[in-house]
Image: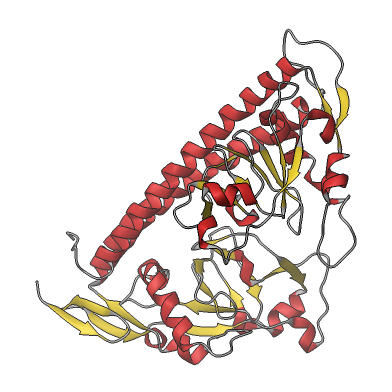
Amino acid sequence: MQFKTIKMIGQIPKEWDTIYLKDIATLITKGATPTTYGFPWVEHGIFLFKSDCVKNGKFRYGEYNYISEEAHNYLKRSKINSGDIVMSITGDLGRVAIIPEDIEEANINQHLAKISIENQKVHPKFIYHWLNRKEIRRYYNLIKTGLAYPQISLKQVRETVVPVPAIEEQKKIADILSTWDKAIELKEQLVDQRKEQKRGLIQKLLTSEVRLPGFHGDWKEFKIKELSKVVTGNTPSTKNKEYYEGGHYPWITPTDISDSKYVTKGERYLTQKGLEKGRYVPKGSLLVTCIASIGKNAIIRNDGSCNQQINAVFPSEHHSNEFLYYKLEKDTKRLESFAGRSATAIINKKTFENFKVKLPPYDEQVAIAEILSKIDENIELLLQNIDQLKKQKNGLVQLLLTGKIRVKV
């Protein structure tokens, strides 16, 4: 197989053509803000979508407003229909999605471009998959204008070069990649279902609305400090290499705490000397952020430490940190309400220690936490499956869209 190298594209099969996006699209334009033209927002009407509706290569109902039929018709060039491709042209550049079939007609604001394709030479979904590549987003970031407010012009979008294999090959490639997308989407739907199931159980089990069979006794209110020891982390001097180099104790900061229930790794690690200068946190402690992103929490799996933006609740025989994790997850909004009114929300150690929670008897705490943990484990397994599918799809994208692997047509 012979290849040729094309600027902006790289290597593709010699028999594949290349073309500017503007030469295969019937229209490439961008939206506008209706209020600029004297049209107010309305309570009900035509959807006007913003750029956050484009996420991870999919169209999602994010932020939107309603506009009148009159405004919609006035802004007719930026009307979108099912099958159109939309692309973010400001901020996080180059995100793309295909408008789904359930949206017959809507409109977009000026942060999105629409690409309408009705051309016998190209298959719209092949073009979508080509544009939905990290290489394209990287290219747009190289040619963008503005640093504080990055953007690309419609001219730059129109002059994007795309490869054009035979139409039947395009369709076959698009079908293969769409099959992977569908598999990922189904797994994501399962994750959403499990999360909804978990929310329902949390509402019932963590409020004593429903009691597990065989458990009795009143739920009692405790201050956090009545349950166990609480420490606020610190930062050993980063200028002293002896505190960090070659360390194996994870030093946890809020950025290390994700949606996962457990935290096992830190971006940085402390040595024994560093740990002595820091705040020792035993494994099984519950870490709760107390500055800015209030209430993010996770259980540390190994002995370690944390910085001053985190309060750590040590494990004890009087309560289950597994249960407390779910309890504080449910009570995040209430915890946030205790933050000060400064520019940066802060809950100091004293306030956190005096935060009150209602707990059932210890054995019931453990039983409830086990039920919720099983759902979390199932969610985590599904997320790992999704991650594997995405990696496999990305590998296929690199091979199929550059012709390194050819499909039979």
In this rendering, the answer to whether 181 lies above or below 405 is: above
Looking at the picture, tell me which residue is in the foreground, 355 or 211.
Answer: 355
* Location of residue 36 by image quarter: bottom right
Q: Give residue 12's position: percent from left, percent from top.
A: 21, 76
Q: Quadrant of the N terminus?
A: bottom left
In this rendering, the answer to whether 117 lies above or below 392 is: below
Looking at the picture, tell me which residue is in the foreground, 334 or 143.
Answer: 334
Q: Quadrant of the C terminus?
A: bottom left
* Left or right: 352 in relation to 363: right
**Residue 175 visible in the displayed image:** no
Looking at the picture, tell me which residue is in the foreground, 302 or 112.
Answer: 302
* Rendered residue at 43%/77% (across/down): 138
In this rendering, the answer to whether 95 lies above or below 375 is: below
* Left or right: 64 in relation to 355: left
**Residue 292 visible in the displayed image:** yes
For the view shown, which residue lies furthest in the top direction?
Answer: 214
In this rendering, the answer to whether 401 lies above or below 319 is: below
* Rendered residue at 37%/51% (across/down): 180
* Location of residue 126 by image quarter: bottom left
* Left or right: 50 in relation to 163: right
For the view shown, which residue lies furthest in the left direction?
Answer: 1
The type of colouring in the image is secondary structure
Q: Give residue 137's position: percent from left, percent from top.
A: 45, 75
Looking at the picture, tell me which residue is in the foreground, 170 or 350.
Answer: 350
* Rendered residue at 52%/75% (across/down): 87
* Rendered residue at 48%/81% (across/down): 141
Q: Give residue 68's position: percent from left, percent from top.
A: 77, 74
Q: Give residue 407's position: percent from left, percent from top.
A: 19, 60
